[in-house]
Image (cartoon, helix red, strand yellow):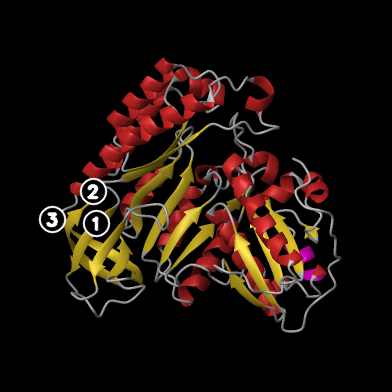
Amino acid sequence: MKNLLPPKVLPIKGKLEGGSIDLITLGCSKNLVDSEKLIRQLELNGYVVTHDAEEPKGEIAIVNTCGFIGDAKEESINMILQLAQRKQEGKLRQLIVMGCLSQRYFEELQQELPEVDKFYGKFDWEKIVADLGGTYHTEASNERRLTTPQHYAYLKISEGCNRHCAYCAIPIITGKQKSHSIEEIVAEVESLVAKGVKEFQVIAQELTGYGTDLYGKQMIAPLIEHIAEVPGVEWIRLHYGYPANFPWELLQVMKRHDNICKYLDIALQHISDSQLLAMRRHITRQETYHFIEEIRKEVPGIHLRTTLMVGFPGETEEDFEELLNFVKWAKFERMGAFAYSEEEGTYAAEHYKDDVPEEVKQARLSKLMRVQQHISADVQESKVGQTMKVIIDREEGDYFIGRTEFDSPEVDPEVLIKKAESPSLKSGMFVQAKIENADEFDLFAISND
């Protein structure tokens, strides 16, 4: 990187009485949970905090950055530069940067973005609060100010990751897996339910490995069972699993509890044996096919979300065709994909040549997503005529916008119900809705309530 702005360093001067803060969160939902906990600490110290404002107007800005892949880094840098411009114009007193990007590139960012008052790592919340003249309230360390609608929340059950996939920088940034205890997580769920939360998106960098560091074995199934038994928990949705050494008892828990959504988010990345080996995924093509078959057999009707990668070093046309055929066979209800980008410090960056041209990566990505587009349209069309349980998230224009158990917030299709036909609906309500029409992205329904 090169110097992006002229040097202009102002020290943090301590707390502003009644000060206002804009906190901007970039990246994944795990970052969002971190921001929510920091917001709570700042509010306990008298700050007025606005999250992800369209036009930041606070005296202090805090950017919680992402540093996972190239596009995320670029988004973080662009946001910092926008706020730096606001500071140069005298509209912002302090600019603070935290999160994954600054955790990983602390020294470089200090040199290249001198207009930032101070950089912090991913978990330096106590330092941020102290440097702003406040006191960190340890008794409230698990409290959050939800930035999501009040009826759902993300529930982070661990930090870090013990997997060392060749392409991934996450373990470099966050370190080894550190699971929160079952008692701590259940207490957080009970607290959130008391505040009106009905739906929990359970998240971790590697959900299926939960508990191995704390209990000496995989404990994701007992944890989810405990959460499912908390009164008031209506939906639980599972994100970011890993296919190798999958804890099959988790599916039995899913079958026993109606409030565990038939939904599993589990990144597969590829299907070619040569690519899986190079990526250090610890699973084979044959095992992956068997894995998908067993999940669908054990939990009929389950919706699988996965993430795939194209353009990893050494990917041939034959490898890519194999991936296309796999997607056509698997018919994933939800699927995302991205093109490989080399991340310094990873095994791939140090041992492989990034030898797939960018234009080839993008062409493969487009072709893969076109295949998935048709699959998604068929999946959506298959729901027409069904009556489904839907949670209402918000109002938008002429519609109430909701989701089924098969849809996670922000990333999955939504259900649109005309306000004129169901004027009494409200955010956070569960309703029975008959699906009348569909496109590849959304369902259109009439509420039976």
Q: Are marks 1 and 3 in contact (CB under 8 Å)?
A: no
Sequence-earlier tag: 2 or 3: 2
* Mark 2 → mark 3, Cα distance in angstroms: 11 Å
- Which marked residue is nearer to the observer: mark 1 or mark 3? 1
Query: Which class describes the residues within 10 Å of circle 1: few (<14), some (14-19), or many (20+)?
Result: many
For residue 11, side relative to residue 298 (left or right): right
Say which amino acid is labelled 2: Gln
Query: Which class describes the residues within 10 Å of circle 3: few (<14), some (14-19), or many (20+)?
Result: few
Q: Are marks 1 and 2 in contact (CB under 8 Å)?
A: yes
Sequence-earlier tag: 1 or 2: 2
Query: In the image, which residues are magenta?
Result: 125-130
Q: Position of residue 371 (x, y in %)?
A: 31, 33
Q: Is residue 25 magenta?
A: no
Dot 3 corresponds to which residue? 385
Q: In the image, what residue occupies the spot 82% across and 46% down?
A: 107
Tag 2's secondary structure?
helix
Examine the rendered structure and indicate whether residue 13 appears above or below residue 382.
below
Query: Which class describes the residues within 10 Å of circle 2: few (<14), some (14-19), or many (20+)?
Result: many
Tag 1's secondary structure?
strand
- What is the number of the mark on residue 380? 2
Q: Where is residue 390, by image quadrant?
A: bottom left
Q: Where is residue 104, by image quadrant?
A: top right
Examine the rendered structure and indicate whether residue 255 appears above or below residue 84.
above
Say which amino acid is labelled 3: Gly
Say which amino acid is labelled 1: Leu
Q: Position of residue 183 (x, y in %)?
A: 57, 62
Viewer-proximal residue among 12 and 348: 12
Dot 1 corresponds to which residue? 443
